[in-house]
Image (cartoon, rainbow, N blue to C red):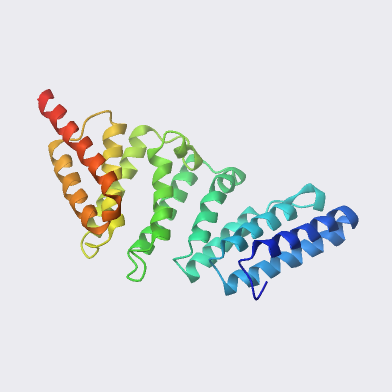
Amino acid sequence: MVGWPKCYWIWNYRLWLLKQANERLDAQVARRLWEHELVLVGKMLTRDSRNFHGWGYRRTVVSQLESPELNGSSMIESEFEYTTRMITRELKNFSAWHNRSKLIPRLLDERKATDAERRQFLDDEFDIITRAMWNDAYPYDQSVWFYHQFLMSTLTESVGHATITPNFTRDDRIEYIQRQLVNLRDFQDGGEDCKWVYNALLEYTLAVCEMEERLPGHDEVEDCKAWLSQLRKLDPMREGRWNDLEKSLKSSRVLSEEHH
């Protein structure tokens, strides 16, 4: 494992051995082996914190330790705290952000979080990711923007929003998106060459229009065209996507003018 940490066959073999322990040993003895394995994978992730094999393996080990077969109980709080520590050490840790996003629905359910507590949780997570986005070392790193996109999807998607704030009204969700749009506009000052900010501004401006069941207004269309122009320069490999969006904006503008 030290020499080949990304060789998944090594992880599979260790997993097979541990499952043999479940079948052949007393539950208490088998549990100690799984606990040692959790310590081991923790050490491995300390050395290679973004190893996605290691993160997947950790999830498997934790699920075993939580299982009735090993007299387990929920480890959701400690695992969520673990992602916080790993992210604090390295903001670019995509695997830690991803794991965090997967833990949140269950975390809030097990806490029996009230609507107010869920709202505060969402506020806190936005604060964390906003600070990361404003960090000079990481504003262009995809992992930070991935987590921001995850949080935004809980507001923009009709199904996704239930994972954190199931009782948010449409107006609540729009209010939160508008706040983020203000932050994203501020981010343009100093982040002029960051494609992620233009992509986010474009996506969430159009999302608000869709949620309000209206066409983009004149100013919104002009803003979107300006952001598209930047995206063409910064991400020319997605020319087809930008062309499709531009056609959509032109159609929206024509329809909007017809309505007036």
Q: Is residue 59 left or right of residue 65?
A: left
Residue most extreme to the top: 259
Q: Give residue 160's position: percent from left, percent from top.
A: 46, 39
Q: Give residue 214's position: percent from left, percent from top.
A: 24, 29
Q: Quadrant of the N terminus?
A: bottom right
* Residue at horizontal 58 percent and vertical 74 percent from the top: 47
Q: Quadrant of the C terminus?
A: top left
Report the front residue among 200 and 133.
200
* Residue at horizontal 68 percent and vertical 55 percent from the top: 60
**Does residue 236 appear anywhere in the picture?**
yes
* Residue at horizontal 16 percent and vertical 35 percent from the top: 250
Q: Is residue 144 above or below residue 49?
A: above
Q: Is residue 258 above or below residue 178?
A: above
Report the front residue among 254 and 67.
254
* Residue at horizontal 42 percent and vertical 33 percent from the top: 158
Q: How many marks?
A: 0
Q: Give residue 107's position: percent from left, percent from top.
A: 58, 48
**Does residue 178 appear anywhere in the picture?**
no
Q: Is residue 47 left or right of residue 178?
A: right
